[in-house]
Image (cartoon, grey):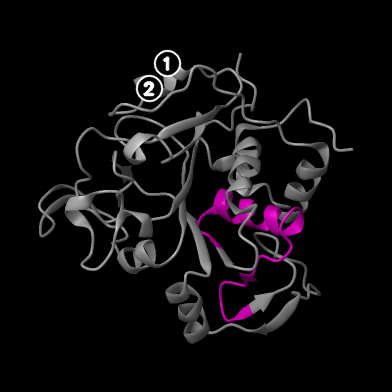
Amino acid sequence: MSNAATEYTLAELCIVASAEAFRYDGEVLATGIGVIPRLAASLAMKTFNPDLMMTDSESFLLSEPNPLGERPADFQPATETWMGFSRIFDNVWSGKRHAMLGPTQIDRFGQSNTSALGGTYAQPKVMMLGARGFPGNSISHPNSFFVPGHNDRVFLAGECDYVSSVGYNPARLPKGHALDDIDIRRVITDLCVMDFGGPEHQLRLLSLHPGVTAEQVQENTGFALCIGDSVPTTPAPTVEQLAIIAALDPHNQRASQIAGNPPGKRS
């Protein structure tokens, strides 16, 4: 039987909580963009969902996730088959992909912004990565979000400065689509775990990380959350999960993903 760890970092707690987003996916292409999302997908593949598909981020499908960072000279990836761009898009357009990424803004509709902040799009105050393939991806397959710093600048009042992805906003639905076509699975932050399962797709609080209150989460969110009478605590990583995470991240890149690398249990 698995035993809960007594000491773990907030990053490790978020990795385990994020992995849960992939639990019931079955055989889909898992794409974790960023250290914590990638480790989360890898942990899911190594434990409760071995059917997940994962690439080496180049052109091959793996039967075992690659560890992060520099690897020994004799390292041999567990290459299973070719997975070039054309096959990636087959998965994307058929809905057989689940991506987890970290937008700069998320509004009450679940629309996100990876593109620009302030000003106009032609002359923004801050230019970021851009929408890239996110508009099509967000209508074609499930997505989840990871936010390392939960505050009301990320979860802003009003609509995103620039809408990079589809959310539960009837006014912006692509022609021929319905709200039921949108599938935002989980939103994991440094404070809590949420989804859009509240009334009329309201963002709903699912669990609070140890030492965090529902009031703190609401104070750091620019719009009203759906909060039940009793919100559970996010489960601690198990000893076994921490060992797998350490093997997947031998250079401890996870330690730099949340400011100050705080412990998972807050006093």
**Residue 102 in the image: x percent, y percent?**
43, 49
Say which element carries label 2.
helix
Residue 198 versus residue 97 in the image, above or below: above
Residue 96 versus residue 89 in the image, above or below: above
Indicate left or right for 172 with 132 as reference: left
**Residue 249 in the image: x percent, y percent?**
70, 52
Indicate left or right for 67 with 1 as reference: left
Image quarter for residue 140? bottom left
- CA separation, marks 2 and 1? 5 Å
**Observer-nearest of 164 and 141:** 141
| Observer able to see residue 254 | yes
Q: At 65% across and 22% down in the image, what residue appears?
A: 265
Quadrant where the C terminus sits is: top right
User: What numbered label is drawn on residue 163?
Assistant: none
**Residue 191 in the image: x percent, y percent?**
50, 28
Q: Type of residue at label 1?
A: Glu
The span picked out in magenta is 31-60
Image quarter for residue 224? top left
User: What numbered label is drawn on residue 215?
Assistant: 1
Q: Does 50 appear in magenta?
A: yes
Cβ–Cβ under 8 Å for marks 2 and 1: yes
**Observer-nearest of 174 and 156:** 174
| Residue sticking out furthest to the right | 1
Indicate left or right for 188 with 27 as reference: left
**Residue 147 in the image: x percent, y percent?**
45, 41
Q: Type of residue at label 2?
A: Gln
Residue designated by label 2? 218
Q: At 58% across and 26% down in the image, what residue appears?
A: 209
| Observer able to see residue 132 | no
Say which element carries label 1.
helix
Mark 2, other Cα within 10 Å: few <14 / some 14–19 / many ≥20 = some
